[in-house]
Amino acid sequence: MRACFQLSCFYSNCLTRIGEQITPANMKTVSIAIDERLLEQIDTIVQARQLKRSEFFCEAARYWLKQQQIKKLVEKDRKGYRRQPVQPEEFGPLIRAQQWGRL
């Protein structure tokens, strides 16, 4: 079974009053469907850290986006090394400098 709820992410400190609720001016509200067991796990964390669900999901989304950015950069790096592999002489002096104590 799925649980549905609304999620609000806070993007700025600029607040506006909507009825009795105070929300940031550029906040968007979205509805998501989520597995109940997963939501229970999230709620346990949210309660322990004294967060709101929206704060949890915003933090999780930022983390996921950052991980995607890292994956993209790693793949770009891999492609670069495939196009132009490291040559043995590139790191020879560094490796020899690190091994000077070993005789």
Image (cartoon, rainbow, N blue to C red):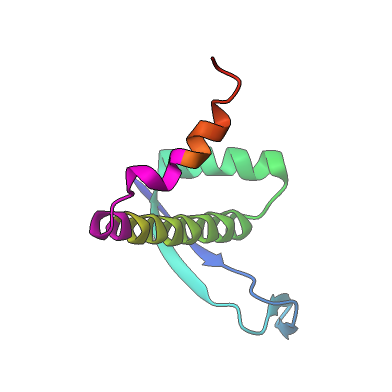
- The residue nearer to you, when weighing 52 against 79, is 79
State the image coordinates of residue 86 (x, y, percent, origin top left).
33, 49
Name the residue located 60 percent from the left edge and 38 percent from the top edge.
Answer: 44
Residue at the location (41% across, 62% down)?
A: 32
Say which of 1 and 8 sits in front.
Answer: 8
The quarter of the picture where the N terminus appears is top left
Using the rendered view, name the quadrant where residue 68 is placed.
Answer: bottom left
Q: Position of residue 67 (x, y in %)?
A: 46, 55
Viewer-proximal residue among 75 and 91: 91
Point out the image quarter for the C terminus.
top right
Which region shows up in magenta? Answer: 79-92
Asked if residue 6 is among those painted magenta in the image, a careful observer would answer: no
Residue 66, x across and y down, in percent: 50, 59
* Left or right of 46 on screen, residue 81: left
Residue most toward the top? 103
Rendered residue at 54%/26% (across/down) = 99
User: Is 71 placed above or below 88 here?
Assistant: below
| Left or right placement of residue 65 versus residue 51 in this view | left
Placement of 24 over or under 52, stated as above or below = below
Residue 88 among magenta residues: yes
**Is 38 located above or below residue 30 in the figure?**
above
Q: Exactly how many numbered labels are in the figure?
A: 0
